[in-house]
Image: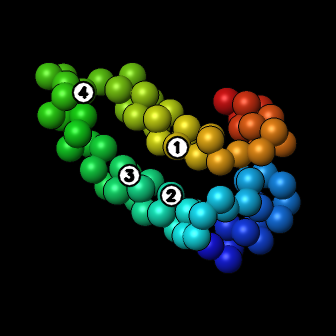
Amino acid sequence: MLMIRAVFVDTGVLRKEEYDHEYDYLIKRMTVFGNFYLASAELNKQEFKEKDIEEYIEIYCLSIYPYLTAKGKKLYRNLS
């Protein structure tokens, strides 16, 4: 959490944690998703295409969106 705070919270990109370990748990959720999205996609799709990969990347990246400040959301939209 220390690095997240120093880089993103202190610069106003991410909001402050609302409960203890909130960002630690976010990182764990994102890790689980990143590790298992292909298995999930194979179970849910008969044929896995390039657009499916793009969709899962978007889902993954949007995981952080609710934690962004207005400044962070503006930066995020500029990246897309």
| Residue 2 placement (x, y as % from top left) | 67, 77
Label drawn at residue 48: 4
Q: Earlier in the sequence, mark 1 or mark 2?
A: 2
Q: CA distance from mark 3 to mark 1?
A: 11 Å
Residue 7 as seen in the image, left or right of residue 49: right
Q: Mark number for residue 34?
A: 3
Q: Is residue 20 above or below residue 47?
A: below
Q: Which residue is mark 1?
A: 63
Mark 1–mark 4 contact, CB under 8 Å?
no
Q: Quadrant of residue 79?
A: top right
Of the numbered discs 1 and 4, the one sitting upstream in the chain is 4
Q: Position of residue 58 (x, y in %)?
A: 50, 33
Q: Secondary structure at mark 4?
A: loop
Give the residue displayed 24% in from the left and 27% down from the top: 48
Real-space Cα separation, disc 1 to disc 4, in angstroms:
22 Å
Residue bearing the label numbered 2:
26
Mark 3 element type: helix
Ranked by sequence position, the earlier of labels 2 and 3 is: 2
SS label for mark 2 = helix
Give, as a three-letter code, the residue at label 4.
Phe
Q: Tell me if mark 3 has few (under 14), some (14-19) or many (20+) residues whose alpha carbon lies within 10 angstroms of its own.
A: few
User: Does label 3 or label 1 sit earlier along the sequence?
Assistant: 3
The residue mark sitting in front, 2 or 3, is 2
- Residue at image x 18%, y 35%? 42
- Circle nearer the N terminus (4, 2): 2
Looking at the rendered structure, the secondary structure element under dot 1 is loop
